[in-house]
Image (spheres, rainbow, N blue to C red):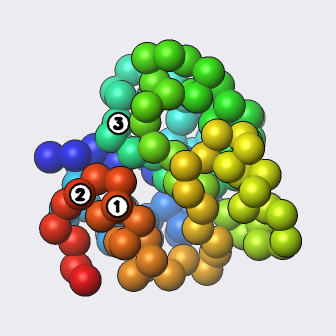
Amino acid sequence: MKRILIVEDIDFNRDLLVQLLEDTYEVLTAPDGATGIALTESEHPDLIIMDLSLPVVDGWEATRRIKANAALQHIPIIALSSHAMRGDEEKARQAGCDDYLSKPLDENLLYAKLRTFLATGLPA
């Protein structure tokens, strides 16, 4: 079973993502960027969903650190953020994110992106 790490500080958002994904994936969670980095180093998830506005270490910096590690840089990171202003997606990609989703979450778009990165049978 593929593993997805959700790095999200808001309990409601984190719980929603877990509910959407737990039947298809093994789901790991982290409430801040520092924990997200540590879990990525120890667990090597198949994909990371990274909120960008996080405590301790923000998602921008957590992404840069993960992508700077040769052993981890292959792991796709999908930014999930309420930053939906013009240019935010480009900034997320410059930080190392492989894709971008804005909040509120469109679950069909999430599933489509996961299919692209993980090639699994998710709801169409």
Q: Residues within 10 Å of mark 2 (few under 14, many from 20)?
A: few
Residue 108, image quadrant: bottom left
Q: Which residue is mark 1?
A: 116
Query: Marks 1 and 2, how far apart in space?
Result: 6 Å
Residue 79, image quadrant: bottom right
Residue at the extreme top of the image, as rendered? 70
Quick check: 56 left or right of 20?
right
Q: Earlier in the sequence, mark 3 or mark 1?
A: 3
Q: Nearer the viewer, mark 3 or mark 1?
A: 1
Across and down, in percent, residue 61 comes to 73, 34
Please name whichever residue, 16 or 110, is drawn nearer the observer in this view of the structure: 110
Which residue type carries mark 3? Pro
Q: Secondary structure at mark 2?
A: loop
Query: Marks 3 and 1, how far apart in space?
Result: 16 Å
Q: Are marks 3 and 1 in contact (CB under 8 Å)?
A: no
Q: Earlier in the sequence, mark 2 or mark 3?
A: 3
The structure residue drawn at horizontal position 30% and vertical position 64%, both measured from the top left corner, is 115
Give the vertical position of 118 relative to 28 (above or below). below
The structure residue drawn at horizontal position 55% and vertical position 18%, both measured from the top left corner, is 69
Q: Which residue is mark 3?
A: 45
Across and down, in percent, residue 124 comes to 25, 83
Q: Which residue is mark 2?
A: 119
Q: Nearer the viewer, mark 2 or mark 3?
A: 2
The structure residue drawn at horizontal position 16% and vertical position 67%, both measured from the top left corner, is 121
